[in-house]
């Protein structure tokens, strides 16, 4: 058994949850917040058999999309104006997945 912890942007969460349900992947959904962009994320915790891990990873790859957005960096504290005060294009989205071995899994 494996424990997958899957972090996606809220924009992808409902599509991913529907894909999990369609493929009989049981998950627990948690609301989380990212540290870098301070934006809403969703974290799924999934207990899954070893032989199904690659199938779940394929679902995540298909549903979670990367996209570009603009972000304005924090203002300089010294009062100076720099190029970093203009919006910069960054890549967001996709998924972060952590896979861990799990000794036991109980469903009551």
Image: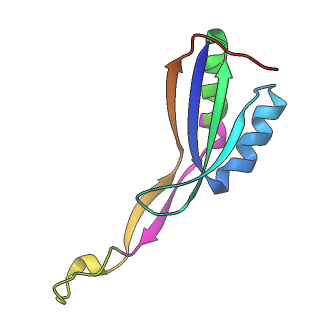
Taking the magenta stretch, the answer to whether it contains residue 13 is no
- 15 or 49, which lies in front? 49
- Numbered disc total: 0
Identify the residue at image location x=72%, y=32%: 27
Identify the residue at image location x=66%, y=28%: 46
In this picture the colour scheme is rainbow
Identify the residue at image location x=64%, y=9%: 51
Where residue 68 sits: x, y (%)? Answer: 48, 61
Where residue 43 sits: x, y (%)? Answer: 61, 43
Where residue 32 sits: x, y (%)? Answer: 58, 52
In the displayed structure image, the side of residue 18 where residue 100 appears, left or right = left
Quadrant of the rendering where the C terminus is positioned? top right
Q: Which range is magenta?
A: 61-72
Taking the magenta stretch, the answer to whether it contains residue 65 is yes
Identify the residue at image location x=20%, y=82%: 82
In the displayed structure image, the side of residue 91 where residue 86 appears, left or right = left
Quadrant of the rendering where the N terminus is positioned? top right
Rendering quarter of residue 78: bottom left
């Amino acid at each position: 058994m494996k424990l997958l912890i899957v972090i996606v942007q809220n924009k992808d969460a409902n599509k991913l949850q529907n894909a999990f349900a369609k493929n009989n992947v049981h998950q627990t959904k948690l609301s989380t917040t990212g540290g870098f962009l301070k934006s809403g994320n969703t974290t799924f915790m999934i207990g899954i058999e070893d032989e199904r891990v690659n199938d779940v990873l394929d679902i995540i790859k298909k549903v979670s999309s990367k996209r570009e957005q603009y972000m304005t960096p924090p203002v300089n504290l010294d009062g100076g104006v720099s190029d970093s005060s203009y919006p910069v294009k960054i890549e967001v989205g996709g998924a972060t997945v952590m896979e861990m071995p799990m000794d036991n899994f109980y469903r009551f």
